[in-house]
Amino acid sequence: MKNIVITGGAGFIGSHVVRLFVNKYPEYNIINLDKLTYAGNLANLKDIEDKPNYKFVRMDICDFDAFYQLMQDEKIDGIIHLAAESHVDRSIKDPFTFARTNVMGTLSLLQAAKLYWESLPEKYEGKRFYHISTDEVYGALEMTDPDGIEPPFTTKASSGKHHLAYGKDFFYETTKYNPHSPYSASKASSDHFVRAFHDTYGMPTIVTNCSNNYGPYQFPEKLIPLFINNIRHRKPLPVYGKGENVRDWLYVVDHARAIDTIFHNGKVAETYNIGGFNEWKNIDIIKTVIATVDRLLGRPEGADLDLITYVTDRLGHDARYAIDSTKLQKELGWEPSLQFEEGIEKTVKWYLDNEEWLDNVTSGDYQSYYENMYKGR
Ligand code: NAD
Ligand code: TYD
């Protein structure tokens, strides 16, 4: 594979994937295809935008004709598909946009790729359609208390490694889909279409389902960057419900590394779960973030704990997500490189060191970055 499209490359995870591929594979042509919605920001890629193997194309993934043309013009061999509407709270307010982009957009890419690849003498040989999905499609897990032990308790993953967990059950690649939010329902639907294109037409597809990501360049509507920014400004921290919901957190660069491994070595038609065996209750993460921001800003210990504000719970709020990524670890040798404590320190430090980025995205100024940068080109 030589000519690769990464959709959603101006977003949070996509920008890390684009950066990794552009730097690691100078022999590839990397095309970042992004519509630049509120979540897309080319400033995320300033450090690589002038590399000769990188190109940005502004396009809506729902634009079938434009994408089919791009497939032909650029002789695309591989697609790494991250573009999506990604925020659960927005999906609760506006489910239609999620169905349009996540379902119809994915279907549009699949159909254009199918038509182009089937027109080639080698057809699907050496081609790949890799769809990035979420663990949220599996639904929610219970918080169980085995043998009367108060969670979190130490448990053993099927990889044989011990880790802390808030329940006995995990999401496996074989877990039945049971999405609850409009976001996860739209992602589940897109996953089904991707698998259907393999099963029906023989398209070489791969799907991965990853847990919650955190790290630099995440839009500050998601828990960790939103709270870092609010603590910075001493604004209230809206904790949904009791703050007892559990999420499994992975440093974004480790997700990008997993995507690289799976894109190159994953088996066609397979699903891989990606996660760090790293479960945290929201309230514990929030306290860790407060302590880290306060320490790095030189504020007294516990100075900002009073910002914690319990608010009405999110509708249909999933209790617990926990990924079992043993298959990926055993079959492809991937492992997370960072412990959570290290990752959160790096993350908080990055946002505090990049206040201009934070201020731009919270004021909306970044949306003129593209217009300014491409003026006259
Ligand atoms: P994000 O919201 O930060 O970025 C999404 C990107 O897609 C943006 O650059 C946006 O401009 C682009 N986009 C949106 N609609 C588009 C359209 N119609 N056409 C072209 N581009 C469009 O999202 P993220 O957090 O980086 O997530 C990326 C992918 O990873 C998504 O598919 C998401 O479901 C999945 N995922 C995210 C997480 C997470 O914790 N963030 C975890 C697992 C899986
Ligand atoms: P979020 O970052 O939106 O990711 P997801 O919903 O995909 O897991 O939220 C992470 C957790 O934090 C989730 O349980 C909801 C909670 N949360 C809050 O308590 N307050 C907030 O302001 C936000 C954005 C999230």
Image: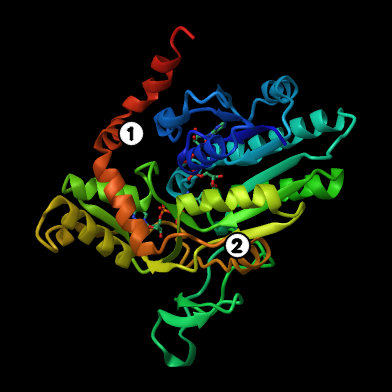
On the image, numbered disc 2 is attached to which residue?
A: 138
The x, y position of residue 321, in whole percent, is: 50, 65
Query: Is tag 1's residue or tag 2's residue first in the polypeptide sequence?
Result: 2
Name, please, the residue furthest toward the top. 376
Q: Residues within 10 Å of mark 2 (few under 14, many from 20)?
A: many
Horizontal side of residue 300 vs 313, given as left or right = left
> At x 53% / y 27%, what residue is drawn?
35
The x, y position of residue 170, in whole percent, is: 57, 72
The kind of secondary structure element at disc 2 is helix
> At x 31% / y 65%, what residue is drawn?
283
- What amino acid does circle 1 point to? Val
In the rendered image, is residue 233 in sight? yes
Quadrant where the N terminus sits is top right
Horizontal side of residue 193 vs 155, given as left or right = right
On the image, numbered disc 1 is attached to which residue?
A: 361
- What amino acid does circle 2 point to? Tyr
Horizontal side of residue 51 vs 358, given as left or right = right
Which quadrant of the picture is home to ligand 2? bottom left
